[in-house]
Image (cartoon, grey):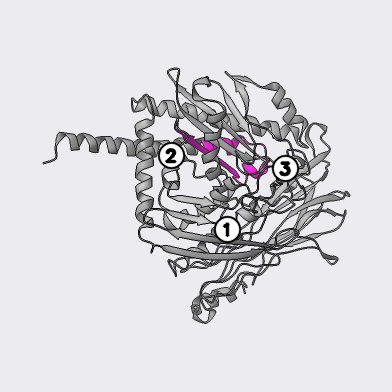
Amino acid sequence: MMSDKNITEDKKNIQNQVMWNRLLSVVEEQGQTLIRTAFSPIVRECGDISAGIFDLDGRMMAQAITGTPGHVNSMAESVKHFINHFPLNTMSEGDIFITNDPWMGTGHLNDFVITTPCFKNNKIVGLFSCTSHLTDIGGLGVGPDATDVHMEGLYIPMLKLADKGVMNTTLLELIRQNTRQPIETEGDVYSLAACNDIGCKRLVEMMNDFNINDLKDLSDFIYNKSLRAVENEIQKIPNGEYKNSMMIDGFENDIKLEATLIVAEKSISVDFSGTSKKSKFGINVPLSYTKAYTCFGLSCLLSAEIPNNAGSLFPFEIDAPLGSILNAPYPSAVCARHIIGQMLPDVVFGCLEKAIPNKVPAEGASCLWNITFRGKTDRGANNNSLFAVTAVVNGGTGARPSKDGLSATAYPSGVRGTPVEINEAVAPLLFLKKEYNPGSGGKGKYNGGMGQVIEIKSAIHEDMDLLASFDRIKFPARGRMNGENGKAGHVSIKNKGKLNGKGTQVIKAGDIIEIFTPGGAGFGNYSERNEDLIKIDKENELL
């Protein structure tokens, strides 16, 4: 028979598991509040956010399912920075803290991170944090042209957005004055604050329902259970040292990404020694963002069913040499850090393929092909004559060991494509074409996902700027297990010639910009492809 002590322990574990599930619903409502109240299309339509709850030690207990790895896993570290700058004993109910520091936030100035302490019975019990991408915060705009971070826009250190419920109107005025979209930007700041507020409200309701006054036991339960689960998965992988490298386009020079992955008994370390030095331009990556996407790649293959939190991330140790493009120090330009950061899961997969063959997908387009335009507009609110918009578009993912890749799908970012109707409503753009690009996915036993072909021009007789931040134009996604490479990306003025993959370029009124996003690579030899699948490919004109 079970002892009374064991019965009590089982009841406690069951209650903790139920509370954990409730907590996941709390942070998902937190994230949905952000999406539903946001002003920027990239948040409202594409879900370029993160939201989560943290204990008083700054450990992430739970994150919203909706959100990008670059935001979530870097935000997991940013809360500790907030606590260091604003000790818990100095926080009051109604306080809200804000920053967009790339090295203490999520990697570039366009991401605002807001953290809010949660109080129950006048006692702080936890912290909620959230992030979203703001389309314009001044400077040279969302592109890689800058040569230091201060050229890239408004730089907000660790500050109070609200003090005991009173908003910092001076800070809000500074934010409004340093953006080409003052209404949208200020609205997004309030949206971030509201998102944390609903999280605090729901957490207190949960704690009242379960009659608890602090989160320590629940946080320890989540941390320890997640840690053990990931350690168990690591133990299934042969111990050893595995290496991989990848070439990508870069800006002024080609970039080499090199990784050494070491599997130990209960941990995995990834060292990016050998990676290229930092760039002069804004494609550099702060280490926090490098860690975020490297950890995500590891989690996808090793612990996909385990919720993401401080415990599940603890066994992964990531490092890159200071001064390399994956650990660029202040004041490096970092605005387009996603270009390289989102390649890192593919780099890690190449290491793990040597340890667990036939379980790793082929390389994909990987980084988002965000099409950012800026210029004059005929549809600005409150007499605003300028527009800045980012149309999120995606390439194909790499083929999987047992399935084709996904077409026009963002991996690893998870950011959804912006609907054409939304882009045309908020900016003077006319989309003439947006469709799959047949044959862009690499052939294989399983084919890579297809990219897209898109044609756009100005809807008014005005020139506009293209802030190009594209990659995989020179170095396409590589196939695995004899699968073929994906097709490289391409950007040009239709019937007039190629454009550069990176850097601001003028699109003349009447010109049509033509964009081909990269395809994912194939997995396995095409000669082994199922005849029924080939027949379907031909019927759907996908080859």
Q: Earlier in the sequence, mark 2 or mark 3?
A: 2
Q: Is residue 261 above or below residue 290?
A: below
Distance in Å between CA atoms under marks 2 and 3: 35 Å
Q: Quadrant of residue 268?
A: bottom left
Q: Earlier in the sequence, mark 1 or mark 3?
A: 3
Q: Which residue is mark 1?
A: 273
Count of numbered badges drawn on the protein: 3
Question: Is residue 39 one of those drawn in magenta?
Answer: yes
- Which mark, residue 155? none
Q: Which residue is mark 3?
A: 149
Residue at 57% x, 71% y is 479
- Which mark, residue 24? 2
Residue at 59% x, 76% y is 538
Q: Is residue 3 above or below residue 312?
A: above
Q: In the image, what residue type sits under mark 3? A: Val
For the record, the magenta segment spans 30-55
Q: In the image, what residue type sits under mark 1? A: Ser
Quadrant holding the N terminus: top left
Q: In the image, what residue type sits under mark 2? A: Leu
Distance in Å between CA atoms under marks 1 and 3: 24 Å
Residue at 82% x, 59% y is 512
